[in-house]
Image (spheres, helix red, strand yellow):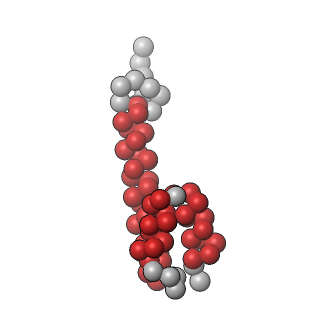
């Protein structure tokens, strides 16, 4: 039986976890850099919100945090 990396097998969960971590770090970085130029609130605070609640945090930042 042949497994592709994200279908299962021993490396599937590891690759999925690494990919999820990479997406989270990219979202926090984007939020921080964007909030430094487009928000009145502190950029580190928006980055923390996105880190603690990624989907809700990005949604809140886009709807409420940007000018």
Residue 11 in percent (x, y) is at 35, 30
Which image quadrant for residue 3? top left
Q: Nearer the viewer, residue 60 or 9?
A: 60
Q: Is residue 6 above or below residue 39?
A: above
Q: Is residue 7 above or below residue 25?
A: above
Q: Nearer the viewer, residue 50 or 23?
A: 50
Say whether residue 27 is visible: no
Say whether residue 53 is visible: yes
Which image quadrant for residue 28? bottom left
* Residue at (39, 58) in percent of width and height: 25
Extreme-right residue of the structure:
63
Image quadrant holding the N terminus, namely top left
Q: Nearer the viewer, residue 16 or 43?
A: 43
Residue 33 in percent (x, y) is at 42, 74
All told, the count of numbered labels is 0
Extreme-top residue of the structure:
1
> In the picture provided, is 38 more to the left or to the right than 2?
right
Image quadrant holding the C terminus, namely bottom right
> In the picture provided, is 10 more to the left or to the right than 67?
left
Residue 43 in percent (x, y) is at 44, 77
* Residue at (50, 82) in percent of width and height: 41
* Residue at (55, 64) in percent of width and height: 58
Extreme-bottom residue of the structure:
40
* Residue at (41, 74) in percent of width and height: 44
């Amino acid at each position: 039986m042949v497994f592709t990396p994200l279908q299962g097998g021993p490396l599937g969960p590891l690759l999925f976890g690494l990919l999820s971590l990479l997406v989270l770090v990219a979202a926090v970085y984007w939020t921080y850099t964007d909030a430094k130029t487009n928000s009145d609130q502190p950029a580190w605070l928006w980055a923390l919100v996105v880190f603690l609640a990624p989907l809700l945090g990005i949604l809140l930042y886009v709807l409420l945090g940007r000018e």
